[in-house]
Image (cartoon, rainbow, N blue to C red):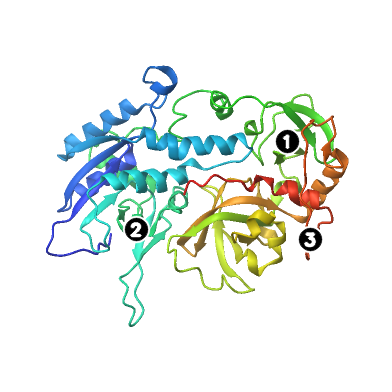
């Protein structure tokens, strides 16, 4: 770790602990240094809101493990209840997206809004580049500092880097934090493999050395069953049709768009082969499926981002403002490798034609294009896409839509079959649709209704 600080002041470090092995080893590594060290545990989910009793997300067990580890290390610890902030800033906005048929990533939002937002605001950390107070976490990520150019009056700036362990790398989840939050962050285990961290925990006889790794969202906890079963406690059913996009025939019914995820198995019984979700249309309240897990309509070569931001907000990637664009790489899911892509602003590309007028007139979007060898499967509005320059994570945005020429052509045929003068045929639903009509520019799409409905999913709540 490289720290930039005042040599005349003591270094104060607050370590965020979850009760798991990663944050426990993080605390141990810091305890071996000459720091003024303390620990904090966040309680983000109040299960009593659901049940009237404490169950589900085992925060009490987590807190007890934190206390045990801290006692063995001789450092003070405290718990901070951020359940209200989590509910208002993360869970409710996520519910809105799920209900509308989008796929949010609450873990990305949590790092910006809670860990490096509400929590950081409560810690004794000054908002200066040379503060001697730091916030350490057990994330698998690394941080470096830029080298100022000659005659550059600015201090070195923090750079978010991928972890040593490519499987555990969590820079994706940190891609939306602010430059200030990153400047105060320490990631002590980012240079270790997960297996090495586990061995360190055993070497130091930490109480959490053999604890199983927690997976998934905090508010889901140890509940059994599908995630959609959990969401059904908060979102009312809204039945609609499931339609085979290859022949435009209804094959089943669904109870809500949020019960299906683009790219995943639609779990429809009684068909000769498995069907997979290719598209969800909120206006039609329809789930569109295709046969087989590798069908071409599941893949996109173009992804549109909105609500995007760079960690260095005043420094866009080189080439972004040119016709050629920025040659970088992107990641859309945790544990997936970054893949090469070209990043452009919507104002410099014909892909701007795929944006709704309300958005294209007021806000620029990022257009990611992927080569044929790296087509992206299962792109869903609401997902996060992070942008890299080598191992340097530059920032991220929220996906508005993903498409390919094949998908657009299939949707064009579908809407021609299932709409008449703005009214959707009763075989699908009785909802009225008022499609937008405007110039298509150089786009190969001939039907404005296709673009209108493809773009209806861009209404992402502002949580950043």
Q: Position of residue 449 (x, y in %)?
A: 80, 48
Q: How many numbered marks appear?
A: 3
**Comparing labels 1 and 3, the label whose residue is closer to the camera:** 3
Mark 2, secondary structure of its residue:
helix
Which residue in the protein does label 3 denote? 439
**Residue drawn where x is 69% and y is 29% of the image:** 267
Which label belongs to residue 396?
none
Count residues near mark 1 (Cα–Cα under 10 Å), then give few for <14, some for 14-19, many for 20+: many
Q: Real-space Cα distance between discs 3 and 2? A: 42 Å
Determine the residue located farthest toward the bottom in the rendered image. 151
**Residue drawn where x is 64% and y is 73% of the image:** 323
Residue 448 falls left or right of residue 329: right
Which residue in the protein does label 1 denote? 287
Residue 355 falls left or right of residue 8: right
Which label belongs to residue 180?
2
Residue 26 falls left or right of residue 34: right
**Comparing labels 3 and 2, the label whose residue is closer to the camera:** 3
First reached walking from the N terminus: tag 2 or tag 1: 2
Circles 2 and 1 in contact, beta carbons < 8 Å: no
Image: 433 above or below 376: above
Count residues near mark 2 (Cα–Cα under 10 Å), then give few for <14, some for 14-19, many for 20+: some
Q: Real-space Cα distance between discs 1 and 3? A: 28 Å
The quarter of the displayed image where residue 243 is located: top right
Q: Quadrant of the N terminus?
A: bottom left
Determine the residue located farthest toward the left in the rendered image. 8
Q: Real-space Cα distance between discs 2 and 1? A: 42 Å
Mark 1, secondary structure of its residue:
strand
The quarter of the displayed image where residue 329 is located: bottom right
């Amino acid at each position: 770790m490289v720290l930039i600080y005042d040599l005349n002041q003591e270094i104060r470090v607050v370590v965020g602990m979850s009760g798991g092995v990663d944050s426990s080893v993080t605390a141990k590594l810091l305890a071996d240094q000459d720091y003024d060290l303390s620990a904090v545990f966040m309680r983000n989910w109040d299960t009593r809101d659901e049940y009237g009793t404490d169950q589900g997300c085992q925060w009490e067990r987590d807190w007890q493990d934190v206390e045990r580890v801290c006692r063995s290390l001789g450092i003070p610890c405290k718990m901070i209840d951020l359940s209200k902030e989590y509910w208002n800033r993360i869970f409710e906005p996520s519910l809105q997206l799920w209900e509308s048929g989008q796929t949010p990533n609450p873990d990305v939002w949590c790092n910006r809004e809670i860990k490096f937002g509400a929590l950081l605001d409560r810690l004794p950390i000054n908002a200066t580049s040379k503060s001697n107070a730091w916030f350490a976490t057990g994330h698998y990520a690394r941080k470096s500092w830029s080298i100022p150019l000659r005659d550059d009056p600015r201090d070195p700036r923090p750079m978010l880097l991928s972890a040593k362990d490519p499987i555990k790398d969590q820079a994706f989840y940190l891609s939306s934090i602010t430059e200030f939050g990153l400047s105060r962050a320490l990631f002590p285990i980012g240079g270790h493999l997960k297996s090495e961290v586990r061995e360190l925990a055993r070497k130091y006889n930490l109480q959490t050395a053999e604890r199983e790794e927690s997976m998934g969202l905090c508010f889901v906890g140890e509940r059994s069953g599908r995630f959609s079963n959990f969401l059904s406690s908060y979102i009312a059913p809204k039945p609609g049709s499931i339609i085979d996009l290859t022949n435009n025939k209804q094959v089943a019914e669904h109870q809500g768009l949020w019960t299906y995820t683009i790219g995943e198995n639609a779990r429809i019984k009684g068909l000769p082969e498995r069907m997979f979700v290719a598209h969800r249309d909120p206006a039609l309240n329809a789930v569109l499926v295709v046969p087989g897990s590798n069908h071409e309509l599941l893949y996109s070569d173009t992804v549109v981002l909105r609500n995007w931001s760079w960690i260095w907000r005043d420094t866009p990637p080189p080439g972004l403002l040119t016709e050629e664009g920025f040659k970088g790489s992107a990641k859309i899911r945790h544990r997936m490798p970054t893949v090469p892509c070209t990043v452009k602003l919507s104002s410099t590309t014909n892909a701007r034609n795929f944006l709704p007028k309300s958005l294209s007139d007021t806000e620029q979007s990022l257009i990611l294009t992927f080569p044929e060898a790296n087509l992206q499967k299962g792109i869903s509005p609401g997902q996060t896409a992070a942008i890299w320059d080598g191992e340097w994570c530059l920032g991220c945005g929220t996906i508005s839509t993903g498409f390919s020429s094949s998908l657009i052509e299939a949707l064009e045929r579908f809407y021609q079959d299932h709409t008449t003068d703005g009214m959707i045929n009763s075989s699908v639903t009785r909802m009225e649709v008022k499609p937008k009509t405007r110039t298509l520019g150089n786009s190969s799409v001939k039907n404005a209704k296709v673009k209108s409905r493809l773009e209806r999913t861009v209404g992402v709540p502002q949580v950043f």
